[in-house]
Amino acid sequence: MRDEICISVIIPFYNSQDHIDNCLDTLQKQYFKKTYEIIMIDDGSTDKTVEKIIKRNNPFIKIFHLKENKGPAAARNLGLKNSSGKYIFFLDADDTISLDILTKLYDEVLENQYDVIFCDKKWIENSQNQRTNIFLYSENKILYEDEIKIEMKKRFLDPVSNVGLFGLTGRLIKRSIIINNEIFFDEKLRYLEDETFSWRILSKIKSVKYLKDQLYHYNVNPNINSALSEGLRKGFPISNFKVARDYIKESLANSGFDQKSIENLSNQAFIFFIISALVSFSKSIALGKIEKFTGMEIRNDFIKKIINDKEILSAAKNYKRSKLESFLIPLAMRLKSRMLLKYACTKRANQILSLRRKNI
C-alpha cells in the first residue's frame, strides 16, 4: 500500500536552467522522512530546464507541461489539480530552502492541526542576506480568526511589516481548504495572483502559525524581470487592479467585516496595489531590467490611464498613507499630475533600492 503523501511541493518554472539545480538540490536533500511529492510545471520553457530535471531520474518528481507560457497562475493551478498531498508547499524555481524546512513546518502543523503554517525568509542578493536579524514578528506566533482579521485591517496600512502573512511561498497550506472551497489562482492576473489567492485562503481558515525562523531563501535576481514588469510590458490593464480589489472585498465579506469596512479596506487595497505597481516598475527601470526608453514609455502610458480613471481618483482621495510610504505619489494622483507622479515614483524607487542595500 502506498504511503500517504504528506506534502505536495509545487514548482512552476519558465526557462529556469540557471537556477533549477540549486532549487532542487535543497529540496531533494531535505531531512524530511515522510513521503512528499515534487510537482513541476513547465510553463512553456524553451531552454534546457526540463532536460536538467529529467536527468535527475527522481521517481518523486512529476513534470506537467503547458504548451505555451501562460504565467505562474495557470502553472500553479495545474500543479494543484495534480497534487495529492495533505499539505501544499509552493516553491519558486529560482529560490532555495533550508534542509529542515519541511520537517519543522510539518511537525508543528501536524501536532497542532493548524490550517496554515509559515516561516520567515532570507532575501539573498550577491550572497548577502538583506534581512539579517529582521523578522515579521518578535517571536513565534499563533493567529486565530480574530487575530487574522486584525492583520487584514493592517495589511494596507502597515504593508511592510505584515506582508508575510499574505505571501505564498515558505508555508504549508492544508490542501482540503483549497479544494473544498475551490480556491484557485486567477489566470487573468499575471500580477497579484499570489496575494489574492492568499487572501481567499485566509478568509476560510481558523488558525495560522508563524515560525520565527528564516527557512525560505528568496533570491533577489537583479537581472530578471518581476511578474509586474512582465505584466505591464505585455499590457496589464487597469481592470486587473479592479479584479484584485474585488477579491479583497470577497475575502473581507467572508471574514465577517461590515459593509463600510469592506468598502474602505478594499479601496485602500486598490490604491496600494497601483502605487506598488508604479514603484516596482520604476525599480525595474532603475535596475536596468527594462530598457530605459521602453520602460518610460510603458510607465507613461500606465500613468495616463491611472489619472484618467474615475474609480482610481475617487479611491485615492481617501487613501491612508503609512509613515513608510511616499506622500508625493498619492498626492500626485489626487492632483492628476503626470509629471509629479513620474518624479515621485522614480524618487521612491531609488530610495527603496538604497535602503534595501543598506539592510535597513
Image (cartoon, rainbow, N blue to C red):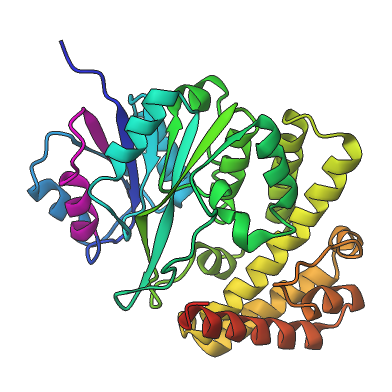
Q: Residue at x 83, y 63 (%)?
A: 320
Magenta segment: does it hold 222? Answer: no
Quarter of the image that includes the N terminus: top left
Residue 68: % across, % down: 38, 51
Say left or right for 281 vs 132.
right
Q: Quadrant of residue 292?
A: bottom right
Residue 32: % across, % down: 21, 36
Residue 314: % across, % down: 91, 60
Report if residue 336 is visible in the image: yes
Q: Residue at x 57, y 41 (%)?
A: 197
Residue furthest to the top:
1
Q: Residue at x 82, y 53 (%)?
A: 267
Q: Nearer the viewer, residue 216 or 47?
A: 216
Q: Is residue 135 above or below residue 144?
A: below
Report if residue 43 is visible in the image: no
Q: Is residue 158 above or below residue 169?
A: below
Q: Residue at x 17, y 15 (%)?
A: 2
Say left or right for 233 vs 344.
left
Residue furthest to the front:
139
Q: Nearer the viewer, residue 154 or 59?
A: 154
- Tell me which segment is drawn in magenta: 20-39
Q: Nearer the viewer, residue 256 or 41?
A: 256
Say left or right for 175 vs 7.
right
